[in-house]
Image (cartoon, rainbow, N blue to C red):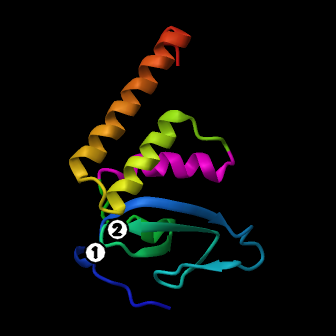
C-alpha cells in the first residue's frame, strides 16, 4: 500500500491508459486501489505529466489534477475499454497525446491538434446526420 499524497503534490494526469474491471465485489472485492489500498472493482492506469505511470480507483483518481489533454484521453480510453475501434479522429488525438508525452511536440500544439480533430468530427456528424445527434 502506498502513502496517500496531498493533492497539491500529485502530478497532473495526461493520459488514461486503461480501465480494468476486476469483476463484481460480491462477496469480497477482487482488487485494491494502487494509490490507497481501498477495496474496489475498477482500476484506472494513467500516465502523468512527470512521465510516471500510476494507478488508482475512481475515488482516488479524482484527487489527481487533470491536464487539459486528459479529457480527450479519457474519451479514447472509454472507447477502447469497450473494445470499440478507434476512428481517424481518435487515432490523431491519441498520437498527439503520445507525441506530447514523449516530448516530440509541445503542449499547445497537442491541444490544438485535439481541438481541430474534435471540430472535424463534429462537422462530419452534423453533415452526416443533419445536426441530429
According to the image, label 1 marks what residue?
A: 7
Q: In which quarter of the image is residue 24?
A: bottom right
SS assignment for the magenta stretch, majority: helix
Question: Is 70 contained in the magenta span?
Answer: yes
Question: Is 123 contained in the magenta span?
Answer: no
| Residue in view at x 29 percent, y 51 percent | 68
Q: Is residue 125 left or right of residue 12?
A: right
Whether 133 is drawn above or below 65: the answer is above
Verify CB contact (< 8 Å) between mark 2 and mark 1: yes
Whether 125 is drawn above or below 34: the answer is above
Find residue 71 and report its horizontal and vertical position in percent. Answer: 39, 48
According to the image, label 2 marks what residue?
A: 64
Magenta-drawn segment? 68-83
| Residue in view at x 49 percent, y 74 percent | 55
Find residue 37 and report its horizontal and vertical position in percent. Answer: 53, 85
In terms of depth relative to the viewer, which is nearer, 2 or 72? 72
Tag 1 or tag 2, which sits nearer the N-term?
1
In terms of depth relative to the viewer, which is nearer, 47 or 62? 47
| Residue in view at x 50 percent, y 40 percent | 90
The 10 Å Cα crowd at callout 1, few under 14, some 14 to 19, many 20 or more, is: few
Instruction: List the single residue furthest toward the front.
Output: 104
Q: What element carries label 2?
A: loop
Amino acid at each position: 500500500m502506498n502513502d496517500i499524497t496531498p493533492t497539491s503534490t500529485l502530478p497532473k494526469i495526461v493520459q488514461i491508459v486503461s480501465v480494468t474491471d476486476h469483476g463484481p465485489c460480491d462477496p469480497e472485492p477482487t482488487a485494491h486501489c494502487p494509490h490507497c489500498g481501498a477495496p474496489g472493482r475498477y482500476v484506472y492506469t494513467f500516465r502523468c505529466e512527470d512521465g510516471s505511470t500510476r494507478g488508482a480507483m475512481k475515488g482516488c483518481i479524482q484527487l489527481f489534477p487533470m491536464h487539459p489533454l486528459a479529457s480527450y484521453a479519457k474519451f479514447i480510453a472509454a472507447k477502447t475499454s469497450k473494445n470499440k475501434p478507434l476512428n481517424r479522429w481518435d487515432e490523431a488525438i491519441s498520437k498527439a497525446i503520445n507525441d506530447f508525452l514523449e516530448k516530440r511536440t509541445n503542449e499547445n500544439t497537442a491541444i490544438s491538434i485535439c481541438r481541430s480533430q474534435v471540430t472535424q468530427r463534429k462537422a462530419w456528424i452534423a453533415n452526416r446526420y443533419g445536426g441530429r445527434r
